[in-house]
Image (tube, rainbow, N blue to C red):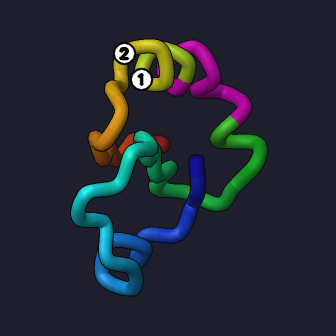
């Protein structure tokens, strides 16, 4: 899990074995309000997938 929106452009993600979840905010208060949604994404993501989670 990261908040680095440029990760996919900075790193070669081909053939990776880990799942990557990108939170589209660095605001801890906003992230804290979305923990249930974030947990759902983490629970559902599979190895090798890349998922961005909008934080409102």
* Residue 1 screen position, x and y as percent: 58, 46
- Which residue matches tag 1? 41
| Badge 1: residue crowd in 10 Å (few <14, some 14–19, many ≥20) | some
Report the side of 48 relative to 29 (left or right).
left
Please report the residue visible at 46 percent of the width from the left and 55 percent of the height from the top.
24
Please report the residue visible at 33 percent of the width from the left and 26 percent of the height from the top.
46
* Residue 51, quarter of picture: top left
Q: Which residues are magenta?
A: 32-38
* Residue 5 screen position, x and y as percent: 43, 70
Q: Residue 14, relative to residue 47: is it above or below? A: below
Please report the residue visible at 58 percent of the width from the left and 26 percent of the height from the top.
34
Please report the residue visible at 55 percent of the width from the left and 57 percent of the height from the top.
25
- Which residue matches tag 2? 44
Q: Secondary structure at mark 2?
A: helix
The span from disc 2 to disc 1 (Cα, nearest Å) is: 5 Å
* Residue 3, quarter of picture: bottom right
Q: Secondary structure at mark 1?
A: helix
The majority secondary structure of the magenta stretch comes to helix
Report the side of 32 relative to 45 (left or right).
right
Residue closer to the observer: 19 or 22: 19
Judged from this view, the residue extending furthest toward the bottom is 10
Q: Is residue 54 visible?
A: no
* Residue 12 screen position, x and y as percent: 31, 77
Residue closer to the observer: 18 or 41: 18
């Amino acid at each position: 899990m990261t908040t680095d929106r440029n990760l996919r452009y900075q790193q070669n993600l081909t053939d990776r074995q880990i799942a990557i979840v990108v939170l589209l905010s660095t605001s801890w208060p906003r992230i804290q309000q979305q923990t249930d949604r974030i947990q759902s994404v983490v629970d559902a993501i599979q190895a090798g997938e890349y998922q961005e989670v909008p934080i409102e």
